Image: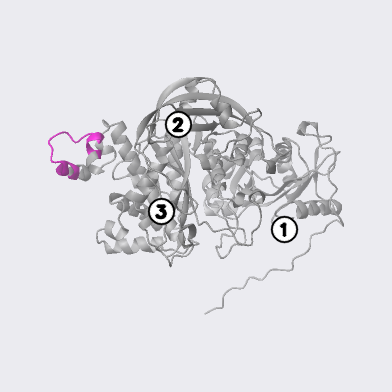
Amino acid sequence: MLPAAVHRGGTVKSPRRLDQAVPAAIDVPAQAGDVRALTLIIVDRLDLMRVWNELMLREHPQGAGPLVGAQMRYLIGSEHGWLGGFGFGAAALHMADRDQWIGWSPDLRRQQMHRVVGMSRFLIRTSVDCQNLASMVQGMVLRRLGADYEAQYGYRPWLVESFVDTAHFIGTSYRAANWLLIGKTQGRGRQDRDHAHAKTVKSIYVYALQADWRARMGVAEPVPLAALDVAEGLEGDEWAAHEFGGADLGDKRTNERLVEFAGTLAAMPGRAFCAAAQGDKPAIKSYYRMIEQADDSQLTMAAILAPHQQRTVQRMKAQSTVLCIQDGTDLNYSSLVQCDGLGVIGSNQTGAQSGGLHLHSTLVVTTQGLPLGVLGAQCSAPQPRAKDDTRPTSAIPIQEKKTFAWIEGLRQCNGVAAELPDTRQVLVMDREADFYELFDEQRRSRRVELLVRAKHDRATGEELRLFDSVRQSPVKGQLQIPVPRQSSRAKKSKQKARAGHKQRTAHVELRWRELEFGPPSKSSDKKALTLRVVHVLETSPPLDAEPVEWFLLTTCEIATTEQAQDCLRWYCLRWRIEDWHRVLKSGCRIEALQHKTAERLKRAIAINLVIAWRIMLMTLLGRTVPDLPAELLFSDLEIEVLQAYAKKNESTSRLGWAMPYAS
């Protein structure tokens, strides 16, 4: 047996630098168009290389390199001083989302790899605050890059790729410069031989230097995604192939088994797979072999959900307006004491901690409340704050806080907006999403709208604070809203006790107005927010109930009472995601899953997220569109069984008939 390979790095040369930091640019104007003598300078001399290295080493999070392959470096110069720089090198060897988008074979990729270059470094100095500068200089460098490569290396690249770390940036300048978002990385670097996935997951952007690059490369144009009706492709025997088929799990057999196993679990939701498989030992063994793959395999929660998420986008495409409802829920796995990778989701009065995962999801529904699918879902393992972490809350970066999940959900909706040019997205969220950074993030792109229930009685630009300012505005309408039932909840960890109440209809007064809110003290350099506020107050609540009072903050335009009522109606549909959580926990019983690692739990959870969505859609379609054919969601055998169970002679061809017996 040969010994294991040993990878020895060569001698690492220190980059040539200046003796001191690059002087700051002076008197840079606020607008890019006013920058004097803005120019790009190719780094082709030692003195320029020293400046470029010094800038990158001191001011770019990735440092100066080294870059690989055929390289080009530029400095961004002006009369004000050095403003930043670019660095281009070889593209990534393998990236699943990029390779799928291009559509090249492995052989073609090896032949044409040099035609794709990577923008490995892009720096606008932090001391430079100049609007539109980033997109302007990107346009400048991309217009000359092909000719510069040809002059230096004898060929022209056709595509440029780059990456955006969405934990810190949203890619505004990339979109302004007409880059195209095509997917995400898997958290691996060029040297990740051990599949450690130690890097952060980044968004992949590409820019075409040649409009006819596909013809030059010899790959076909992609077929645009077709819009899907709500229930299209959900036939009883085929739905799993549509919602799970095509997942990139690293092995064709695993992809096929995922479809088969999802169909088996959906036929008997809430059962362990060994029960759902009804004694099929080969299937049982194969299922657990799949779920128990190594934690660093390609069988991830994101990979399992990817086909369903694409189908969700197609269903969104058929709607003029969709509601993207975000919320989180804790999954209790405290009985799995030997499970690795769980977090802490609470503690009791004795201080004993409960192990589990936190699920944060985006469920998309129509404006009538029919669920279109799960656009995003992530399971985190919350950890208590370290005892030696004495930072005040205001000093903790937003990326380290639980609330950052809401921003990630917003960024995901922004990411699919380019595929939905005719569909309006409204993100609907509860009070936990009432924080300044979320609204600040939204206004940087303005591709989606926000509708958030207010939690904080904020200061306004007026004498009164938010709540009293709106309460004292004139009543603009009277209406009725449904108040769903609420189960009582005992005090748990940081959650307060909650009294239960029955479902009822509340008679409310409607008010709305526009207000301006200043930034928090920790973000005093930010601009004020201008939002619309919709307020409802129950006038005659039951004696044993608190009156309904909501303050809804929204970026949606409100010029009429009808528009305010739309926002109110949309917010009432926020409970759809809580209904979905109940289906997950009570119907699919995901908290009864038993696996030895959190990663394996996430795989099983991902499958059940889609199953729970289908159960919920079946139920709502049966209620709202009872005349649809039962064959839409049930196989012939299932209809025959339901007919025998009902023991009736009535027609069984309609969905509204089948649903009561299937539930």
Q: Does the rendering let one see residue 530?
A: yes
Residues at marks 3 and 2 touching, judged by CB atoms closer than 8 Å: no
The one nearer the camera, 368 or 640, is: 368
Outermost residue toward the front in this view: 543
Residues at marks 1 and 2 touching, judged by CB atoms closer than 8 Å: no
Q: CA distance from mark 1 to mark 2?
A: 51 Å
In the image, which is nearer the foreground, mark 1 or mark 3?
Answer: 3
Residue 605's mark? Answer: 3
Outermost residue toward the bottom in this view: 1
Task: Based on the picture, tell me whether residue 653 belongs to the magenta stretch.
Answer: yes
Q: Is residue 297 left or right of residue 232?
A: right
Q: Is residue 314 left or right of residue 257?
A: right
Q: CA distance from mark 3 to mark 2?
A: 28 Å
Residue 570's mark? Answer: 2
Provide the secondary structure element on which disc 3 rests. Answer: helix
| Rendered-image quadrant of the C terminus | top left
Provide the secondary structure element on which disc 1 rests. Answer: loop
The one nearer the camera, 404 or 265, is: 404
- At horizontal 48% and vertical 49% (from top left) the residue drawn is 495
Q: Does the rendering let one see residue 420?
A: no
Q: Earlier in the sequence, mark 3 or mark 2?
A: 2
What type is the residue that disc 2 sits on? Trp
Q: Which residue is mark 1?
A: 66
- Stretch in magenta: 641-659
What type is the residue that disc 1 sits on? Pro
From the top left corner, tell me how far across and down residue 198 is, in percent. Answer: 59, 60
What type is the residue that disc 3 sits on? Ile
